[in-house]
Amino acid sequence: MQAENIKKAVQYRKLIDVLLDSNQYADIVLKDGYVINTVTREIYEADVAIKGEYILMVGDASGLIGSKTKVENVKGKFVSPGFIDSHMHFESAMLTCTEFSRLSIPTGTTTIVADPHEIGNVLGVHGMQEMIKEAKTLPNQIYFTVPCAVPDAPGLETAGFDVNSSHMEELLNDPYVQGIGEIQSFSNIGPVYENAPELIDDLVAAVSYAESIGKTVEGNAPALFGKELAAHIISGGGHVSCHETTTKEEMMEKLRYGVSVFMREGSSQRNMAECIRAITEEGMDSRRAILVSDDMVPEDLLKDGHMNDIIRRTIAQGVDPVEAIQMGTINPATHFGFKDVGILSPGKRANIAVISNLNEMAIDQVYLNGSLAAERGQLTIDLGSYTYPESVKKSVKRGPVKAEDLHITANGSRARVRSIVAIPFQNLTGAQEFNLNVSGGVVQPCLQQDVLPLIVVERHGRTGNIGKAFLNGFKLQSGAIAESVAHDTHNIIVTGTNYEDMVTAVNRVISMDGGIAMIKDGKVVGDLPLRVGGLITDELSGQEVSEKIAELTRLAESELGCGIPVPFMHLSFWSLVTSPEWKITDMGLIDVDKFEVLSPVVE
């Protein structure tokens, strides 16, 4: 870091010379555009002068134009700071950092804060460090907030590796690590306090260390109010974020407590429209309101955009365009303490989005570190490709399963069962009981009631557990779908209309060393190998992954009759035990609120 500070000091000295020496000039001047000031919430006509990686000045830059200065006429266009995604997971896009950047930079995203707890759950510290190593090769600013507790709920799930406060020194002292990521281990306040207080002790130790070296801490507070919300905030050191806010009432209380509310608007969880009502209806201050994607599929990035699309959706909810842009620029920069981005002003990094249509957030050009990086939706720089080492592959460490391994058994001809209830576009779930037929001692799926077996198979080679429950709301008509993406411990999750196809799907995932598999009548309908931790592919480009996921989604609907949107992402979240109400892990059906394992069959 000292070398970086020295380099910056030298560059700043050169900027002063250019400004004050009449014989020195800017490299680039964006001429006559409408500058978006994210501090004063103004739009006014001004030039933006750039030298090297930095902004020289914003105003009349005619005196900084020399014979070698590149002058870009942006008259009639809007010049904004580059956008910041404050909370996302590369693993959810199934893309490397490189391929995600290839898709997101042309949309105006120049800074990303990623949480690598997905690969951390599978491969521990080593997996996270390999992802950070990749990010260091890229020109956009990518920072990481790392987990301080893996798994989130010890005793209720099995991760590939355990991570705790003892690993924080090794992780947090990397300059690319911004701080501690979402503290999910203390999301279920009451149950954790009653049943696993040692998690709180370890969390406080990790947070204390992070604060001692100037790192930030991100929260995770779904449906928390009053004393429980207060306890969560204190556990994170007094200032945290929350990306799990889903109602106006939650938003209001968290803003009043000083929480930075990360309004999530991704591919399968969309909460911004409800959260923003605290601002549009109640007139609350928006300085702590921040837009994030959390989880996005490549098809959405290509079709709709990234942060520019989220800002566009926010504008459509009645928010002033400049205020919406603040939520993706200066607000996150302030939250994280980023001093060099989020505003167009002298000495700031020249990360800039030129917008041709403000309400539609159509991005004309993107400048990254003072260089043109994208124009009219196409990269103008070469990112190359990135291949991960074998040490983060071969992460599926179990042999094939048999159909009887997946059977949910019961006596008699009818059984009353417990079922997770899917809620579209949420990672929250409901809980309900159903009556199902039993044949040969095995509880049968029921398409009429839309109740299917839901199974999680431990794949890390640590326990061999197979957790069992039922699922209502997936709207599958035939076949089975299995995947090694199952938040957060990422064992193999599978559901289907019959056990035979389910076991074939699981074994297909095992044979691929991780990925997605769809089976119908014993045959592969479609699959996608994800060999990096069973989560990511480094064999396909972002465009190719997008096309493949789009094809698999189409096949899920046309061949299997699946009626829920973004089916693979929805399926992956039904094992997330840090959000209510019922979930499933390799340990079984979990009552999240009670912190206990339930039998899938009511005794």
Image (cartoon, helix red, strand yellow):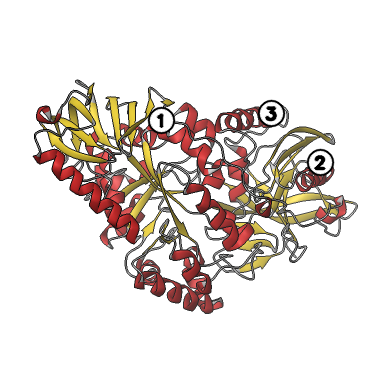
Secondary structure category for the residue under label 1: helix
Q: Quadrant of the C terminus?
A: bottom right
Q: Quadrant of residue 418?
A: bottom right
Residue at numbered disc 1: 106
Q: Residue at x 40, y 60 (%)?
A: 218
Give me the disc on residue 353.
none
Q: Residue at x 35, y 73 (%)?
A: 212
Residue at numbered disc 3: 555
Query: Against 443, is 500 above or below?
Result: above
Residue at numbered disc 2: 501
Secondary structure category for the residue under label 3: helix
Q: CA distance from mark 3 to mark 2?
A: 16 Å
Query: Against 329, is 160 above or below?
Result: below
Nearer mark to the viewer, of 1 and 2: 1
Q: Position of residue 585 (x, y in %)?
A: 66, 59
User: Earlier along the polypeptide chain: callout 1 or callout 2?
Assistant: 1
